[in-house]
Amino acid sequence: MQNIDNYDFKGKRAFVRVDFNVPLDDNFNITDDTRIRAALPTLKKILADGGRLIIASHLGRPKKNPDPKFSLKPILAHVSQLLGVEVKFAADCANAQNEIAALKDGEAILLENLRFYAEEEGKPRGLAEDVSDEEKAAAKKEMKAAQKEFTKTLASYADCYVNDAFGTAHRAHASTALIADYFPNDKMFGYLMGKEVSAVKAVMADPKRPFTAIMGGSKVSSKIDIIENLLQKVDNLIIAGGMTYTFTKALGGKIGNSICEDDKLELALDIIEKAKENNVNLVLADDAKIADSFSNDANTQFVAVGEIPDGWEGLDIGAKTEAKFAEVIRNSKTILWNGPTGVFEFENFTHGSRTVAEAIVEATKNGAYSLIGGGDSVACINKFGFADAVSYVSTGGGALLEAIEGKVLPGIAAIQG
């Protein structure tokens, strides 16, 4: 494994896997270029060295090759503008040999969407539902061989490989993991990927104490593996968001029409017991801001979290819980935030999440390490304008969650060995 800071790209063709899976409007205009900007330090380093830059990414989930609505060509002009060089375009990522051979030092090319080829993900497409197990096995075997050839083709374009796409690090795809084997002595993380790996290590491998995790989200079932792994690592675990009401009902409380997984009540009680066994301070809500409909304009009131009347539902935490959560957070030295406290998309139910964010910012100012991850938490921190006031905001949704679960991410393992 190489270090990008010390690597000289002069005259070398560098295959850089980025995550340019950016949102586009109906006219194919980029509505949020955060992911592109996040990769710029890596791309500019290669160009400044005099390297020959090959940019590779996916966009969306195309089911055919090609699929114009998932083409990367509409982002080409913006990438060129941000990089300060005219980026060329290869309309077929698997047949770009001539375009890449024509590259000169300090030039760049963007490959068309890698996922136009099923070989990128390594999954057969178009199989009928009624095919036999034998046919499925044969299709998988054929795809595995095709994926190997596809990976070999991508690798043939370059002299070195740089993975700067943490958002896809949990996928063992051709361009995110398999290609690294072709560069045993010339593979490395990009700057963004390096930051993400360091951030995960800071909270999961070597946290300063007390370590507090704030877990939101609507379903306990979607976070159970994360919670169980965290219970072996954290000092405080704050349960927020829609999960609150599953725990509240499991403890005998009345939750009205609040979101709840009735089949996970025993699971919630098991988590409470495991927290006790691991000497983890499990922090649950005391009160809630409730509404008589799921709407920003609904009638609201504050009640004890276990005393929500029928016809009402909890959409945020109340003042007592805000103070309780904030005190735990302010006294922490490592903080992981994944999931808001309520329906922050509605302006009338943002206060709890804002209070949590403000407490994280205060703790960070006082020396805590804070990692914000997961789409909604990132949206919160950006909405409140606090992204620059915390230690790190992760670009990886599913990848970060799997890392928190304790899983080995293929895209990281492929580089680190």
Image (cartoon, rainbow, N blue to C red):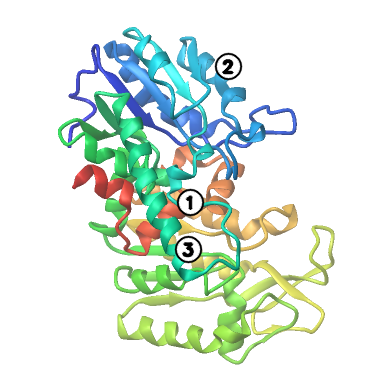
* Of callouts 1 and 2, the N-terminal one: 2
- Figure quadrant of residue 33: top right
* Image coords of residue 275 (percent x, y): 37, 81
Which is in the foreground here, disc 1 or disc 2? 2
The image's mark for residue 77 is: 2
Q: Amino acid at mark 2?
A: Ala
Residue position marked by numbered label 1 in the rendering: 397
**Residue placed under numbered mark 3 in the picture:** 135
Mark 2: secondary structure: helix
Give the secondary structure at mark 3. helix
Disc on res. 158 = none
Quadrant containing the N terminus is top left
Q: Nearer the viewer, residue 174 or 346?
A: 174
Whether residue 390 is visible, yes or no, is no
Residue at (84, 64) in percent of width and height: 298
Front position among marks 3 and 1: 3
Considering only vertical position in the picture, is 185 above or below 281? above
